[in-house]
Image (spheres, rainbow, N blue to C red):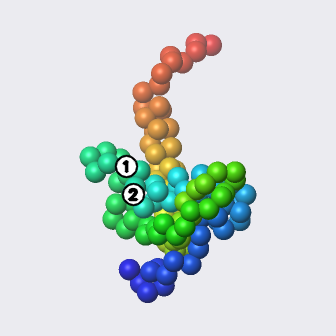
Amino acid sequence: MSEENKTMDYSSTKLALEDVIPHAAVVKKLKKYSGQNYSKATGGKIFRTNPLKVLQYARAEVEGSNQTIYKFNKKHYDKCAEMEFTYQQKMKQAGKDRLLANPIAKKKKK
C-alpha cells in the first residue's frame, strides 16, 4: 500500500454531510469495504484482496443517536466504490445474458 493510502484523512460524518445521506448508510459501506460485515466462508470477495482500513475514532451524537465515528482514507474508499460499481455492472450484464439464453416466458405468437 502506498504512503498516501495509509493516511486516515476523512471521517464518516464528513462523508455523510458531503453526500447528503444518513451516517448509518456511510458506516454500512465502510464496514462492507473493510470486510467487517461478512464471514470468511461467504460473500465479500471483491474487497478481500485490499480491504479498506478504518479506525473507530470516537462516539458522538449523530442524527439523534449515539454512533461511532470512523476515520478512513478517502482515495481508498473511492477505489472500493469504483470496484463495487464495476462488479455491479458485470453482474447486471451476466443476468441479462442468462435471461437472453433462457427466457422465462415464451415469446408471443403474432
* Neighbour tally class for label 1: few under 14, some 14-19, many 20 plus, Cα within 10 Å: few
Identify the residue position indicated by label 1 in the image.
38
Amino acid type assigned to the residue bearing label 2 in the image: Gly
The residue under the point 43% across, 35% down is 98
Q: Which mark is residue 52?
A: none
Task: From this view, report whether residue 26 is shown above or below residue 18.
Answer: above
Q: Which residue lies furthest to the top in this view?
A: 109
Whether tag 2 and tag 1 are in contact, CB under 8 A, the answer is: yes
Quadrant (top left, top right, bottom left, bottom right) of the N terminus: bottom left
Residue 82 in picture, x, y percent from top left? 53, 63
Q: Which of 71 and 18 is in front in this view?
A: 71
Q: Which residue lies furthest to the bottom in this view?
A: 3
* Label 1 secondary element: loop
Q: Is residue 21 left or right of residue 109?
A: right
Residue 5 in picture, x, y percent from top left? 46, 79
Q: In this view, does 92 lie to the left or right of 61?
A: left
Identify the residue position indicated by label 2 in the image.
35
Q: Nearer the viewer, residue 45 or 30?
A: 30
The residue under the point 55% across, 67% down is 58
Residue 84 in picture, x, y percent from top left? 49, 56
Quadrant (top left, top right, bottom left, bottom right) of the C terminus: top right
Task: From this view, report whether residue 63 is shown above or below residue 82.
Answer: above
Residue 63 in picture, x, y percent from top left? 69, 53
